[in-house]
Amino acid sequence: MFRKSARIIDSYLGYVTGKTLTAWLLMDFGGGLVRAIGGGYLASDDIEANERYGEDFVLRLVKVYGAERWPPVAGTSLEVLFEADSVRSAILGVAGPDDRLEDFLFDELTLEMDV
């Protein structure tokens, strides 16, 4: 897993397809490279599972950057976790600026939903 530090420059909190809560962070990696991370949602027929997933996704993003509120403060740095040794590869999750905070791997939340 490859890690690269980036700064939060924008954020979004809202609904996907009008029903599922989600969030994403727009991250600046420097050198003109900007990517959105997050935006995950569970495309399940189980409406309650979709709602739980969206809420948990947002809460875990808030926890990983060490805050107690949304939106995150622009300029806050996070470690973005990539599948391969390139910032253009698939994003697996995020790690906070403090080693005491637990990494948030997006697929782990999907597995926890058990649908």
Image: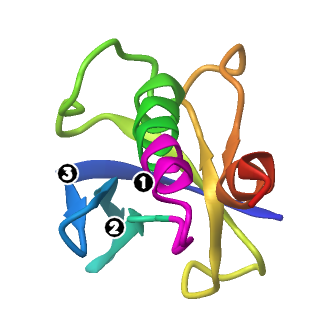
Ranked by sequence position, the earlier of labels 3 and 1 is 1
Tell me the element at label 2: strand
Which residue is denoted by mark 1 in the rendering?
6
**Residue 31 is covered by the magenta coloring:** no
Residue 23: where, in percent of width, then height? Answer: 31, 53
Secondary structure of the residue carrying tag 1 is: strand
Confirm or deny contact between disc 3 and disc 1 (CB under 8 A). no
Which mark is on residue 46? none
Tag 2 and tag 1, C-beta contact below 8 Å: yes
Q: What residue type is labelled 1?
A: Ala
* Cα distance in 3D space between marks 3 and 2: 17 Å
Residue span colored magenta: 42-53
Q: Helix, strand, or loop for circle 3? A: strand
**Sooner in the amino-acid sequence: mark 2 or mark 1:** 1
- Residue receiving disc 2: 30
Amino acid residing under circle 2: Gly
| Direction from residue 57 to residue 82 in the image, left or right | right
Between label 2 and label 1, give the one nearer the viewer. 1
Q: In this view, does 31 lie above or below 63?
A: below
Q: Which mark is residue 11?
A: 3
Query: Which residue does the image show at 47% across and 65% down from the upper left?
Result: 40
The residue positioned 50% from the left and 41% from the top of the image is: 52
| Marks 2/1: CA–CA distance | 7 Å
In front: 115, or 41? 115
Q: Residue 96: x and y, percent?
A: 56, 32
Rendered location of residue 7, percent (x, y) = 33, 49
Q: Does the magenta stretch include residue 47?
A: yes
- Residues at discs 3 and 2 in contact (Cβ within 8 Å): no
